[in-house]
Image (cartoon, rainbow, N blue to C red):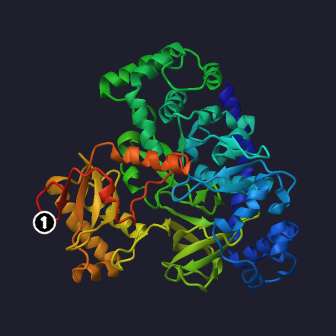
Amino acid sequence: MLRLLIVHTIGKLIAWPIRRRLRAFDQACLDPRAVQEQLLQSILRRQAETAYGRDHGFDDIRTVEDFRRQVPIAPYEYVEPYIERVKRGEIHALINEPTIYMFALTSGTTASRKFIPVTPQYLRDYRHGWNLWGLRTLRDHRRAISLKPIVQLAGDPDEFRTEAGIPCGSISGFTTQVQKRIIRRLYCVPPETGRIKDATARMYVAMLFSLPQDVGMVVTANPSSLVQLARVADERKESLVRDLADGTLDRHLDIPDPIRRSLTRKLRPRPRVARRFESIIRQTGTLYPKDVWERHLIGCWTGGSVGPYLRQLPRYYGDFWLRDLGLVASEGRFTIPIVNDTPSGVLDITTHYFEFIPEDEADSPAPTVLGAHELQEGRHYFLLPTSAYGLYRYHIRDLVKVTGFHGRTPCLQFLGKGSSFSNLTGEKLSEHHVTRAVEEVARRLGFGPGTYSLAPCWDEQQPYYGLFVEEGDAVGGEAGRKFLDALEERLRQHNSEYESKRDSGRLGPLRVVVLPKGFWTEWDRNRLRRSGGVPEQYKHPCLLGDVNFRRSVPVLREMGGSTEVRSP
């Protein structure tokens, strides 16, 4: 009865705002230049009295040309000295707001974690983007998922604090904590779950609270987390059934006592649910989400390097709708997908000012810089966001492709991090080349590797690229040779420099390099530990530029497209 009352109340609250907000965004997309230039001037006026604003003459900026002349294109390291001052409590070094809630920490995928100030304006912009995403998704699937329980995985918003006592952690965890209580009731996973450090325990708790409910939507950035979530549920199914029957929380899980006590208070015995799950296990032998939930919507990343995990989702989740979350990170939300089954989303021109550098000018000391209204469909660009919370012409190194337009505003697809390149003999191979080729071959052949990385391997006679996979993966034996031949063909098609180096003999043919089972899980865990990142945002690199990588790993055997398996 309480849930029905909540659903009815929320439905009345959001019906009219849905239409109003979506119409306003669509209207803005008709004139991106005017919207963007007005937003830029608003940001500069607001931040003119900060130390950064004074150092860069914000008061004197009247045009976009002035802005580009006085503020350099720069990576995080350029603004880091100002952020360090904010961390010590000197907020006005970078931010002209009365308070800072926390620092959102980046994932640590490619380098050490960065500190992004979360201010009231940051939170408004972040919520605005998520609301637009959620409202369109709800509108498109109103009958199937409207106001059903939501499974959302979030992190710890308070991993540690700066010298001034400012929390540092996950922005998803923070937004979960500050949700309105009536909205919070729609979410299955208690917010304190994000503070559990042990990944298995965190996934177990999420499933304990979610599996019994009539879930309409599952939301988490990285599809690898969805795969792990389902595997934990199945691997721990006997314990889950026991805990559901008794209203308990497995005492063997590594959960701090204060969090355990808080979670236990929210549990109650559910013997009927436990018996239903026991019956499912007897019939299917598994306890996956597909065994319990009806058709639902999954919101996660679908672009970049996540293809191997997306291919696994039907096995665990059955039939579902899939909507990309958009280009969203600790630095902010940049795109808003508005249809299913595509990694493309509309550029959110209402919260950030955006500039773009053509891909082929990435290393130019004076590159062409374009506004959102100047982009061309089919072209690749590096994204330069300017925010209202201290990031200006920020070279985030995200490579995007223009897939079309919504009104006159570009729709963008995330391709990968621009830092993910390999150039052993001048082939200039990018992670996007690799992931695109692997996914195309996997679709055509009906199989492909799970977790993998392509890396250059040095050989005195002829260097080559190795496709590093684990023992037992799908690209061993005869199937592996077939996969390599098709992958070779695709890489040649997508990269003329690679084709040239192969034709000239400067690069040898691809080889499969087999590693021990479980290697990538441990390697990713160690890489994440060194950077201090979080699993929910971490992206496994599908291309490594390190020519010494092969010598650093325990190779079991190696196989070429036309050679027999041999020992290293």
User: Which quadrant does the N terminus fall into?
Assistant: top right
**Quarter of the rendering containing residue 219:** top right
Q: Report the number of numbered marks.
A: 1
Can the viewer see residue 214? no
Badge 1 local density, few (<14 within 10 Å), some, or many (20+)? Answer: some
User: Which quadrant does the C terminus fall into?
Assistant: bottom left
Residue that appears at 63% across and 69% down: 75
- The residue sitting at the left extreme is 564
Tell me the SS state at disc 1: loop
Where residue 35 sits: x, y (%)?
A: 74, 73
Where residue 106 sits: x, y (%)?
A: 60, 54
Front-lying residue, 485 or 34? 485
Front-lying residue, 509 or 372? 509
Where residue 5 sits: x, y (%)?
A: 70, 30
Front-lying residue, 481 or 567? 567
Residue that appears at 74% across and 84% down: 69
Amino acid residing under circle 1? Ser
Q: Which residue is mark 1?
A: 562
Position of 325 compared to 311: left or right? right
Residue that appears at 79% across and 83% down: 63
Can the viewer see residue 95? yes
Picture layout, residue 277 above or below residue 58: above
Residue that appears at 45% across and 41% down: 295
